[in-house]
Amino acid sequence: MSNNLQKYAVLIVLSGILFFPFLGGVHLFDWDEINFAECAREMLVSGDYLRPQIDFMPFWEKPPFFIWMQATSMNIFGIGDYAARFPNALIGVVTIVAVYYAGKKTVNEKMALWWAAVYGASWLPHLYFKSGIIDPTFNLFIFLSFFQVYLLRHSEKKWLHAILAGLLLGMAALTKGPAAILIALLALGVYIIVTKGLNDYKIKHLFTIAVCAACPFFIWITITTIAHGMDYGQWFLSEFVRYQIRLFSTEDSDHGGPFIYHFVVLLIGCFPASVFLFQYIGKRDNEHKTSKNDFTRWMWILFWVVLILFSIVKTKIVHYSSLCYFPLTYLAAVQLYRLTNRYERLKKSVKIILLSVGTTLALLITLLPVAGLNKAKITPFIADPFAVANFRANVLWSYAECLWGLLYLAGIWTAVILMKKDFRKGLTILIVVQIVIIQATILHFTPKIEQFTQHAAIKYFEGFEGKDVYVHPLGYRSYADLFYSRKQDNAAPQYLGMRKDKSGRETPEANEHWLLYGKTDKPTYFICKVMDSTKYAQMPQLQLIGSENGFVFFRKKDVHTVSPQ
């Protein structure tokens, strides 16, 4: 094995050790993780791999590629939490290898190693590879597409790179939707403005990219329309487009926030990589070649396009800005390369921000067990009755667990102090400390947090697995009842008829109305949050059967029709 292949093998093994173990150590989190996992499970149950479904009704919010990955994983490992998260762990390994390769091609091997290291050692970039959400796969496709666009200008095989750039962009669209195309178009527009033209890019190559980008989604929707009919194809596209517009123009699902939301998310969530971007502030044109690299220009453009776009978008969710992780860590790695090779010195302001953000995170981890041990003193200051009830969960804490936060605090301060004398040694310590604390958080603290939030509901749903019953959440949106009860598509004929609203379309709302008031053919159970429990307790057809940690459980008294109140 050549020396080059050995380095890639080491990267694969190390990243595999970081991302693959303990993926199933905690339940999937509502909504997004369970949403996509349930789509994959229903593909296996129904045998329909063309149409994403939720509750065995068409699901128009996302295209199917990532769901196909999860369905494949579930075919291998069985339906469960580990299988749902395995695809992203695999994507994590591919991502670390990809950034190393891209770093070598665009700058050099030393910078590439720092890029791979800082990507894996930053909080959110690391954590998302242990999740079951779409974004890591979506982001990788877009990044690789941009990398191919860079190679298109700097390589002799222009047609090959144009085709690959388009297909990768198309796979991103088949993974999450048209946001991929919008981001690419905006980035191209900004690039043209910055460079005052196409800068050696040819129209014929850009046209090839556009055609190839349309192919994956077009092929899928065409095959699906042939299999399920023109009416379905038209309906899906209509609902899909309306959903995308709603995400951009409204605060979907109460996920709003201020314009600076994603600025804060990236600063805290991408620590420590994000802090090194402040090294750029106040710089004049740098003589070192990496500042004039065309790839650096693309990465700056991608960073600002994504950050500004999703700051404008009304719906604010943490992972919406996750595509920034690639350019952010690249730009940070460029600075780390310069600093470790003494091309420049670490700014005092950067040290202060590094210590401030790191200390804040360390103190939060330190105080987490303290809060758990002093719940009674904290709950009087919480106004939300559901949060108060969540906080009453019987979770075991000890003051010894504060040592994780104190270790983190000591590690950050030691690293920053060492950076003054030997930046490389200080940075290495910072990266090692980051990886250790991230793993400790995933393995030790995340299960405890889940016990406070959704554990009671998940256990309730798991109790119905394999039982011929209906179980349904009231007053709040969840996919956990479907995934953890392993619901089958075995509804009675009258149930299928009641799933339609007045316009004849199948809807979850019609489903809920029938379960509450219709003549159900099997035992029917419900769950709601504590603040809604009085409302449902007054319904004569419902019997209260228990409550736990903010969730209240009901059983329908009989299967006869009950008139709405």
Image (tube, grey):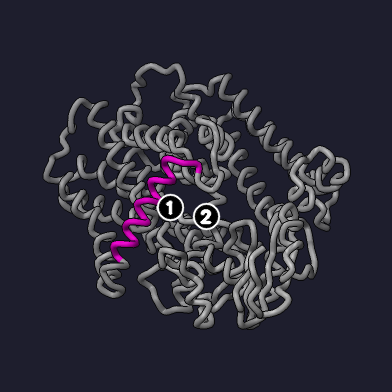
Say if the magenta span includes residue 532: no
Q: Nearer the viewer, residue 327 or 239?
A: 239
Task: Kindly check if marks 1 and 2 are in contact, taking CB atoms under 8 A apart as contact.
Answer: yes
Q: Residues within 10 Å of mark 2 (few under 14, many from 20)?
A: many
Across and down, in percent, residue 238 comes to: 33, 56
Q: CA distance from mark 1 to mark 2?
A: 10 Å
Query: In which quadrant of the rendered view does residue 189 lie?
Result: top left
Q: Which residue is mark 2?
A: 129
Q: Can see residue 432?
A: yes
Q: Report the predominant secondary structure element of the magenta stretch.
A: helix
Q: Which residue is mark 1?
A: 95
Position above or below: 359 against 159: above
Question: What residue is shown at x 51% (from left), y 79% (from top)?
Answer: 489
Q: Nearer the viewer, residue 362 or 446?
A: 446
The magenta span reads 233-251
Position of the N terminus by quadrant: bottom left
Q: Is residue 508 left or right of residue 301?
A: right
Q: Nearer the viewer, residue 425 or 489?
A: 489
Query: In which quadrant of the rendered view does residue 194 lie?
Result: top left
Position above or below: 387 against 66: above
Tell me which amino acid carries mark 1: Thr
Tell me which amino acid carries mark 2: Phe
Say if the magenta span includes residue 240: yes
Question: What residue is shown at x 42% (from left), y 55% (from top)?
Answer: 137
The mark lying in front, picked from 1 and 2, is: 2
Q: Residues within 10 Å of mark 1 (few under 14, many from 20)?
A: many
Q: Can see residue 448?
A: no
Across and down, in percent, residue 155 comes to: 19, 44
Mark 2 residue element: helix
